[in-house]
Amino acid sequence: MRATRKLTVGLIAAAAVTALAAPASARPPGSADPWQPLPPVPSLDIARYVGTWYQLAAVPQPFNLNCARDTRAVYGVLDASNISVDNTCTTWTGETNRITGNARVTDPVTNAQLHVSFPSVPSQSSLDGPTNYVVTYLADDYSWALVGDPARASGFVLSRTPAVSADGWQRIRRVVESRGYNSCLLLTSPATGGRSDIVPLCTA
């Protein structure tokens, strides 16, 4: 288990080195400015957005380093402004890790910016707070999405299914980069029925 965790940390470090070494390129027309807050989609239909989402790739976060595979989120409607959050994953020891919380809409114009809170986390226990979850891309059929925080310190590629074609991964990378992210900083997430490796998105 320790060796596996060291491997994961090593991959994170490698991703950071790759990102620093990657040549800078001009932003495609219509891309988000990476120095500006992450923009939300124009409109989010919460009734269509809730349900199960599988994590395909993510900017590594301290709270999910214990997740080895099958990281997913299940959202449910509580009322017009609140969504239930149930996050689970399989740990390196094969156990199920779970945390439940709440997502409150902070932007009623788009419904695409929310404050996510978890009662069990002291620094994130308040239902009210600043936006820390922005849906910045959403497929027309709500089949996959890109979410993050306004400063892009976090980023998650979510999908209704864990399996993605090679062309699909290229499309995901283009969208991630168009939203001002460095795709080398996101690592793929192993999932049953999907990828089994952990590599920087820029090489996936």
Image: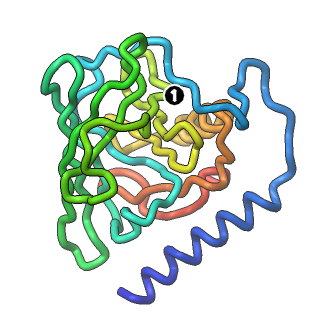
Q: Position of residue 121 (x, y in %)?
A: 26, 59
**In front of the other: 137 or 54:** 137
Residue type at the position of mark 1: Thr
* Closest to the observer, 79 or 4: 79
Q: From the viewer's perspective, is 169 left or right of 124?
A: right
Q: In front here: 155 or 183? A: 155
Where is 68 relative to 3, above or below? above
Residue drawn at 45 percent across, 24 percent down: 138
Q: Which of 176 and 126 is in front in this view?
A: 126
- Helix, strand, or loop for circle 1? strand
Up the image or down, 148 lies above or below 42; here it is: below
Please state the horizontal and vertical placement of residue 180, each as a whole percent of the image. 68, 36
Q: Which colour scheme is used?
A: rainbow
Which residue in the protein does label 1 denote? 136
* Residue drawn at (43%, 57%) of the image: 189
- The quadrant in which residue 71 appears is bottom left
- Whether residue 18 sits left or right of residue 2 in the image: it is right
